[in-house]
Structure formats: structure tokens, C-alpha cells
Image: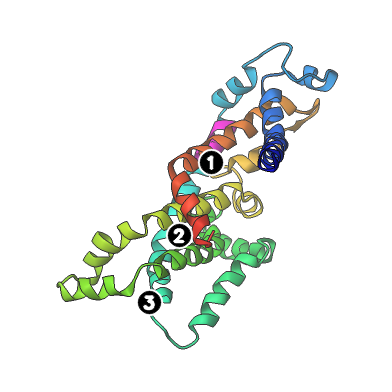
Amino acid sequence: MDETRRFRKRTIFLIAYLLFALLPIYWMVNMSFRTNQEILSSFSFLPQHWTWDNYRTIFTDPAWYSGYINSLIYVGINTLISVLVALPAAYAFSRYSFLGDKHVFFWLLTNRMTPPAVFLLPFFQLYTTLGLMDTHIAVALAHLLFNVPLAVWILEGFMSGVPREIDETAYIDGYSFPRFFVAIFLPLIKAGVGVTAFFCFMFSWVELLLARTLTSVNAKPIVATMTRTVSASGMDWATLAAAGTLTIVPGAVVIWFVRHYIAKGFAMGRV
């Protein structure tokens, strides 16, 4: 009886948590199929007059869909560079001991703790001088400051879980380091690479301050476009809800592909 009661309590708590977590997402999707007049005039759990006009606006207006393209470009560049840079760095922290290694590792994490606004002016002046303002690579490189430390931290945990004897055995068998790293070591930590790529993608996708300040037209991301929905007639809530719904899609796709790796990362205590 006690076991059944505890099971019911856990079930009730889980359902309540899911409702609390999913309600904002559902309401945003709900608003995306309404008109602004209906959103402001009535309250209902389902749209009274379904419309696809908000999504049609996003897919046909270059000011909207170009924001998604720009975001995907610089987020993809950042994720790729972050993982490629973090792999050798994490391997060094995992396999070697050198002077100040613990201090350097902690210093990397302090960059992730620092608010982006602290680095905003240096990036702005540097990119203005180099002519990198309003380019995809500018935002991608700026996000490296925060994503590389995170990537090193996650990958180092996965690499430390791989026995050192595997490295030594491979060297005895005549493997060069690049061949060993690609053919043997990377497959062993593919879960860590998947988790790292996911978190780099997520943090770069949702970051607003640097992405908005370092771009204006050619590389303006969707997060910046969504902040400019105010017109003379007021806030365009319906289009904003449709845009918000579409911003969830890339993250959901990435989560689907790395869902098993994320679970393993939590199990290892590194995520």
C-alpha cells in the first residue's frame, strides 16, 4: 500500500512538473495560430480562428527567414570550431600534468562565468578595426570565448574516463598520434563529443547581446529580429509567437540526435 501511494505521489508530481514546463511552450504555439486581435481580445486554450498567416509572413519575408539562416550559419561555425579546438586541449588536461595546469583549467571556466557585456566593447572595437563587423564569423569567434571553456570542461571529463592503457597499447602497436586519436580515441568519447556539440549549439543559438551588437543587416540573427517587432500599431504578438515556435525547432532536432549522449553525460556527472 505504501509503495502504491509513493508511486501515485511521484506520478502526480511528474505530471504537474510537465504541465508547468510545457505550458509556456504550448501557449506560444497557441498564440502563433491566432491573430493579434484575437490574442488581445479573448482568452481561450484553443484558437477560435486558426490562421497560418504568421508562419507565411516568416517564410516569405526576407527580414524574418534570413535571421534563421544567419543564426544557423554562425552557430554551425562556432560549434564546429569549438569542438575542434577543445578536443586537443581537453586531451592535454586529461593525459598530461604541467606547471599551472589546474590554474589554467580554472581560468578557462572563469571566462564562462563572466557576463558577455564585459567583453562587448573590446569585441566591438577589435572587429571595427579589422572590418569584421556584421559578419557571421565575427559572432562565431566571439562565442568561442564562452563555448570553448565549456567544451574543454565537458570533454575532459569524458576523456578522463578512458583508461590510459589504451593510449599506451596503441603506441606499442605502432599507431601515430593522429591515427590513434581519430581511429581509436574519438569513437570511445563520441558521447562526449555529442554532448559538447549540443551545449555549444544551445548557448550560441540563444545568446543575444553579442549577436545583436556585432551585427546589423547582413548577419543579423533571429534573436535580434525578434526584438524588433514593435510598429506604429503596437507589438506584433502573433508573428513573434510564430517566430518563437520556429526557434525551438533546431534545438529540438539537435536534442533528438544526441538525446542518448546527453543522458550518458548526466550519468557521468560532467553535464
Can residue 227 be seen in the rendering of this structure?
Answer: no
Callout 1 secondary element:
helix
Span of residues in magenta: 64-70
Look at the picture and state if 15 lies above or below 218.
above
Q: Is residue 251 left or right of residue 24?
A: left
Residue at image mark 1: 251
Residue 82 circle label: 2
Q: Residue at x 63, y 42 (%)?
A: 223
Amino acid marked by disc 2: Ser
Residue 207 screen position, x and y as percent: 62, 51
Q: Earlier in the sequence, mark 1 or mark 3?
A: 3
Q: Earlier in the sequence, mark 1 or mark 2?
A: 2
* Labels 2 and 3 touching (C-beta < 8 A): no
Residue 234 screen position, x and y as percent: 81, 28
Q: How is the image coloured?
A: rainbow
Question: Residue 156 sits in which quadrant?
Answer: bottom left
